Each structure stands twice: as structure tokens, then as C-alpha cells.
Image (tube, rainbow, N blue to C red):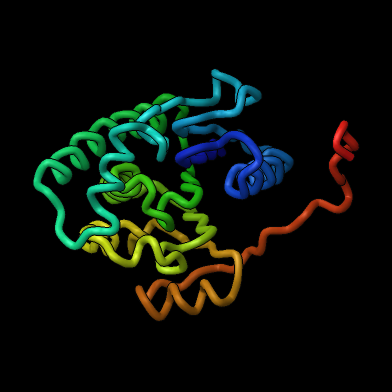
Amino acid sequence: MNIGFISTRLAGTDGVSLETAKWASIFESEGHLCFYMAGELDKDKPSQRSLLAEEAHFKHPLVREIYRGCFGVRTREPSVTKKIHQIKNKLKKYLYEFIGGFKIDLLVPENVFAIPLNIPLGLAVTETVAETGIPTIAHHHDFFWERKRFLINAAWDYLNMAFPPHLPSIQHVVINSSQDNQLSLRTGISATIIPNVMDFENPPSFDEYS
């Protein structure tokens, strides 16, 4: 099976990137092939298995403009809405290229549907899943309602649509029972709990800071 991971960033030592690497390692140990699409990718991600989509990054200038136009305010300028849909449509082209080019059988959006740092990406993945029916495991690490900075916003229409989406081909995974309870209470979505864990059998090696 060809499994496609999608995120804003799959690079460095942030929690999402580290957990993605763990999941990919497990999938590959079972004989699957893993592919990656993000706005930033680790150099160890082979080019023949990855697609860089700069607009997927939450630090992309236009995405940051959208963020500022949607959060900490109560109304949204029409120009912000226009930018959202322009970037969403561009990201959908990347997604169709990613799915078709790598013959993806299963999508794994990593926190794409949980934290709205990149609203166009959440919308693009939601629409692509709705249009294709591709099997999807939505891996949620932390939801927007867990962070105060997202509570005052002018994007409830998008949050209700895609953060997270309620679609028949999506299975949802959260990292603890509190998230499971809140997700069910707020959206009616049930989830599987898979905690983040350390690989104690293969601890990190010593480095110059150890």
C-alpha cells in the first residue's frame, strides 16, 4: 500500500514531525511505502517519494496574512476570503498531483485538521477527500479549541467545515481520552486513541550536548 503523509511541515524536531516518522517507520516495517507532502520537508525525505508545496507551510507569507485576517478579529475582509480560496485551489492541484503521481492508497493528514494555522490547507484536503473518497486517517495532535488564541476568530465557517471534517472515508485518531471526549462532544465524531510514545528499545544516541 502507498501511504501519503500530509502536513504543513515535516522537518525538524517538532512533535508532529517526530510522530510522523514513528508512524512511517511502523508502516514501512509492515511492507508499505510512505510518501510525503508538506510546505517544508527534511532533507532525508527522498525526492522520489515527496512533494514540496510551499503554500502548505504555515509560515508562507500569504498564509500568515490569512491567519492575521481570521484570528483575533470578529469579521473577515472579502480580500482574505478571496486569498483563502486562491491558495486552497492551488493546494488542491498539488494534492491531486501527489495522490495521482505516487498512486496513494491511504492519506494521513498530520494535524492538518486540528490546528488552523493554514486554513487553505485544511480546506484543500477536506475537499479532495470529499471528491475522491480516498481512505484517510486524520491524525490529530492538538485541537484549536485547546488554544486561546484561536477562540476569537472570523473563520467559524471554515472551522466547522474542516477542523476537523466529518466525512465517511475519514477515520480520526487522537492522542488521549480527553481529546476523544471533546471531539465527540463538539462534533459528534468518534475517534481511536493512539498515544504518543517513546521508542525505549531504540533510544537516541549520545551527541555533543549529552
Is residue 168 visible to us here?
Answer: no
Q: Residue 47: x, y in percent?
A: 55, 19
Please determine whether, in this image, residue 170 is positioned above or below residue 127. Answer: below
What residue is shown at x 85% (from left), y 37% (from top)?
A: 209
Q: Position of residue 188 (x, y in %)?
A: 37, 76
Q: In the image, is residue 43 above or below residue 90? A: above
Judging depth in this view, the residue of 185 and 102 nearest the camera is: 185
Q: Quadrant of residue 14?
A: top right
Question: Is there any visible trace of residue 139 in the rendered image?
Answer: yes
Residue 121 in the image: above or below residue 33? below
Which of 137 and 109 lies nearest the eye of the viewer? 109
Q: Is residue 176 left or right of residue 87?
A: right
| Image vertical order of residue 56 relative to residue 150, above or below | above
Horizontal and vertical percent position of residue 151: 33, 67
Specify the farthest residue to the left.
78
| Residue depicted at x 26% and y 46% | 131
Count the marks: 0
Left-right relation of 50 to 150: right
* Residue name at image x 43 percent, y 49 percent: 112
In the rendered view of the protein, which quadrant contains the N terminus?
Answer: top right
Q: Residue at x 86, y 46 (%)?
A: 203
- Quadrant where the image shows the C terminus: top right
Residue 48, how many percent across, how many down? 55, 19
Q: Which of the pair 49/40 is nearer the observer?
A: 40
